[in-house]
Image (cartoon, coloured by chain):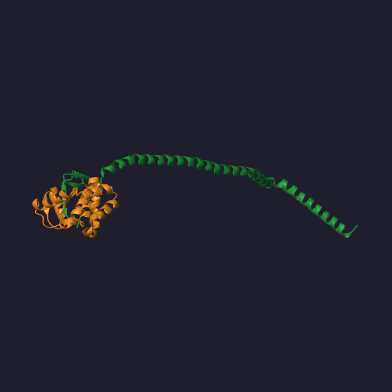
Amino acid sequence: MLRTEPQLMSEFVSTGQVRLGFHHILDHGQASEYASMATECAGEQSPTQFWTMHDLLFSSQSQLFRADKATYNAFASQIGLDVAAFGTCMANDTHLAKVRAMNDERVSEWSIRRRPSFVINGKVYEGGIPFNAFEIAIQEAIG
Amino acid sequence: MPKYWKRALTASARLTILALLLAALWALGACGNMPEVEAPAEEDVALEEVAPATEADTDTSDEPVSETSEVAEDAGPEEAVVTGEMQTDSEEEIAAETPEEEVAVPAVEDWTQHFVAEGQYIYVGNPEAAVTILDVSDFL
């Protein structure tokens, strides 16, 4: 998604034709759980901050494999979150059950085994797809 | 009496005689050809009379310049007024157009700055969008 998201945002989301959501997949155990929880804890403070943390994590991807909760507190500080509230959210694993449930859904609901995958108006597109495939899929969805 | 006095008297006597002769000749000529003699004299006089008139003309010729300048001055403010009116009109036109543009600006919204929580997702974009895309992914 890192490659195609900017194009999707500029061509379809910005114009109001498409809205975009993020569904968590946890393929790397605790490291994946921490990253997904961090976005949910940020979103708890503000919906805008969910996507700010989302962008920061994708741009800091190489640091995430060994990141502990203190690392995420530093990320929270970097984007201007209430670090104390964020730290409490992370320490209490407030959103752990939610992100685990979402990870389960991708198999139970959509049978998705590869990533990144996309669900466009309920239709699954598994694996990385080129941008022109998005254009076709969006046109099909619009009808 | 010194010689130079004699010479001077002789010279003056000669000149006097010459003047008398010329006067006589002129008197004769005046009687015989009066119009011819007087005509140039009148012309001379006329020219002399014209001279003040010329001065007057010169003065008059100055007047047109001043009139021209007055006209120019008159024209200047008129033009300035016209220009001012034109500027006023254009400003009014701009003022009339500006609100329309200002009204048009909010119509274009950047939906990438619009975030809404719905269900288990936090979406970015138009909540009424025809298409919903879920990015099913891991941050790592």
Q: Evaluate whether residue A46 shows in this view.
A: no
Q: How many marks are shown on the rendered structure?
A: 0
In the rendered image, the vertical position of residue B67 relative to residue A130, given as above or below: above
Q: Nearer the viewer, residue B82 or B111?
A: B111
Q: B88 or B33, which is in the foreground?
A: B88
Color used for chain A? orange
In the rendered image, the residue lying farthest to the right is B1
**Percent x, y for residue B42?**
66, 44
The x and y percentages for residue A35 are: 21, 54
Left or right of B17 on screen, residue B78: left
| Colour displayed for chain B in the image of the structure | green
Q: Which quadrant holds the N terminus of chain A? A: bottom left
Residue B106 can be seen in this image? yes
- Which percent across, then down, holds residue B111? 23, 47
Q: Nearer the viewer, residue B127 or B120?
A: B120
Which residue is depicted at the point 23% across and 56% down?
A: A68
